[in-house]
Image (cartoon, rainbow, N blue to C red):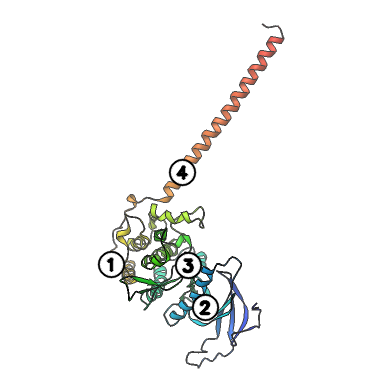
């Protein structure tokens, strides 16, 4: 069993300083100092600090989950030279139940923390950060082997304190796909026996996998998985909240919500958000039969629209009409209000019935008492 207390040496060149946080998949993340640090080194030891991720296989970790964790090292290694993607320094399968990953350390916070601290971001600030995220995702999608992240969310985007560095992290459930040289379709290279993700950011396209065999997943896992997540992230950056409400974010049935409802109008939350930004989100999260026609085909289309929105915000370009006018949208909060009114009405009626029944019973009892009293007093 590996013990990473302060002062412990890891992989022969990292000295543990302190624990940073708890990670997913039964992992702990530590800050470590590179004992071979040399700022004049070309690449190998140019970094002074590293984030050490220690993953221990728990009793509830399935073989499938463990394979996914092993896939993460391979995927992150492929991407280490890409812009805005976390760099992998070392990856070691210590034993059958322990993995150690050394990664680039970013002194800052997650995007989710930044949103929480600021309430919401101005359109220009949100666009600035979002563009860097798009650049990272573009490199995944245009890699020699296409990588679909599949767990894009504010918790998996790191920001340095001065906002000069933005890093995409956590490729633990990513899918790697390449064009088949044998068949005219796509072949999936990662383990895909089960499906994971964070439901509020999970595309309803995942529902297409029901009843499918794992060898048919390659043609079903598409860039839309990441486009949808990006749309939810962008909405959250601009408003400080997610577009949909969930009674239980862990309930798989919640994945169907975007199939039924449109996104709430952004101007009602922040009047400074132009229609072109809202149209981008509509296109990214398009899930229903009515909105699928608006979907993006690639990241370049999203980046191009983002550039247009910058011009709109700077007054150099006229804004657009909304793709889906507010009056034609089916909005979740209206149904929630309607259901609340119906529930209140049901509660009021039930109380009226209950109190009415009690009142009637009391009156009947009083009448019976009076009648009995009259009878025994000789009134009849």
Q: Position of residue 37 (x, y in %)?
A: 55, 90
From the viewer's perspective, tell me whether residue 19 is left or right of residue 212: right
10 to 141, vertically: above or below: below
103 to 353, vertically: above or below: below
Per the rendering, the mark at residue 106 is 2
Q: Front-most of 8 and 158?
A: 8
Q: Secondary structure at mark 3?
A: helix
- Say which residue appears at 28% left-offset and 58% top-offset: 321
From the viewer's perspective, tell me whether residue 104 is left or right of residue 18: left
Which of the two labelled residues, at mark 4 and mark 2, occupies the earlier sequence position?
2
Per the rendering, the mark at residue 317 is 1
- Could you tell me how far apart the alpha carbons at marks 4 and 3 are, in whole angstroms? 31 Å
Which of the two labelled residues, at mark 3 and mark 1, occupies the earlier sequence position?
3
Q: Secondary structure at mark 4?
A: helix
Local packing at callout 3 (Cα closer than 10 Å; few below 14, some 14-19, many 20+) is many
Q: Secondary structure at mark 2?
A: loop
From the viewer's perspective, tell me whether residue 253 is left or right of residue 324: right
Local packing at callout 2 (Cα closer than 10 Å; few below 14, some 14-19, many 20+) is some
């Amino acid at each position: 069993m590996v013990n990473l207390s302060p002062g412990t040496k890891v992989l022969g060149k990292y000295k543990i300083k302190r624990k940073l946080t708890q990670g997913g998949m039964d992992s702990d993340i530590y800050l470590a100092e590179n004992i071979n640090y040399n700022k004049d080194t070309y690449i190998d030891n140019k970094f002074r600090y590293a984030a050490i991720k220690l993953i221990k296989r728990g009793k509830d970790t399935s073989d499938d989950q463990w394979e996914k964790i092993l896939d993460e090292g391979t995927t992150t290694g492929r991407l280490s030279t890409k812009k805005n993607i976390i760099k992998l320094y070392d990856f070691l399968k210590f034993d059958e139940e322990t993995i150690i990953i050394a990664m680039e350390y970013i002194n800052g916070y997650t995007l989710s923390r930044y949103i929480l601290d600021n309430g919401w971001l101005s359109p220009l600030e949100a666009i600035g950060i979002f563009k860097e995220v798009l650049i990272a995702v573009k490199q995944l999608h245009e890699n020699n082997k296409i990588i679909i992240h599949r767990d894009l969310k504010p918790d998996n985007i790191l920001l340095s304190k001065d906002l000069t560095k933005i890093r995409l992290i956590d490729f633990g459930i990513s899918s790697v796909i390449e064009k088949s040289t044998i068949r005219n379709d796509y072949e999936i290279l990662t383990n895909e026996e089960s499906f994971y993700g964070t439901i509020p950011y999970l595309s309803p396209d995942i529902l297409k996998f029901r009843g499918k065999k794992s060898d048919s997943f390659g043609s079903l896992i598409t860039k839309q998985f990441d486009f949808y997540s990006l749309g939810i992230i962008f909405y959250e950056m601009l408003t400080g909240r997610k577009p949909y409400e969930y009674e239980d974010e862990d309930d798989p049935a919640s994945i169907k919500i975007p199939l039924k409802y449109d996104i709430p109008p952004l101007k009602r939350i922040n009047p400074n958000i132009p229609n072109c930004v809202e149209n981008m989100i509509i296109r990214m999260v398009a899930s229903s039969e009515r909105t699928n026609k608006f979907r993006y085909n690639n990241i370049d289309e999203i980046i191009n629209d983002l550039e247009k929105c910058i011009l709109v915000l700077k007054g150099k370009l006229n804004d657009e009409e909304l793709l889906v006018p507010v009056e034609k949208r089916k909005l979740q909060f209206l149904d929630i209000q309607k259901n609340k009114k119906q529930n209140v009405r049901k509660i009021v009626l039930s109380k009226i019935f209950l109190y009415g029944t009690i009142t009637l019973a009391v009156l009947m009892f009083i009448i019976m008492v009076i009648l009995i009293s009259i009878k025994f007093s000789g009134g009849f």
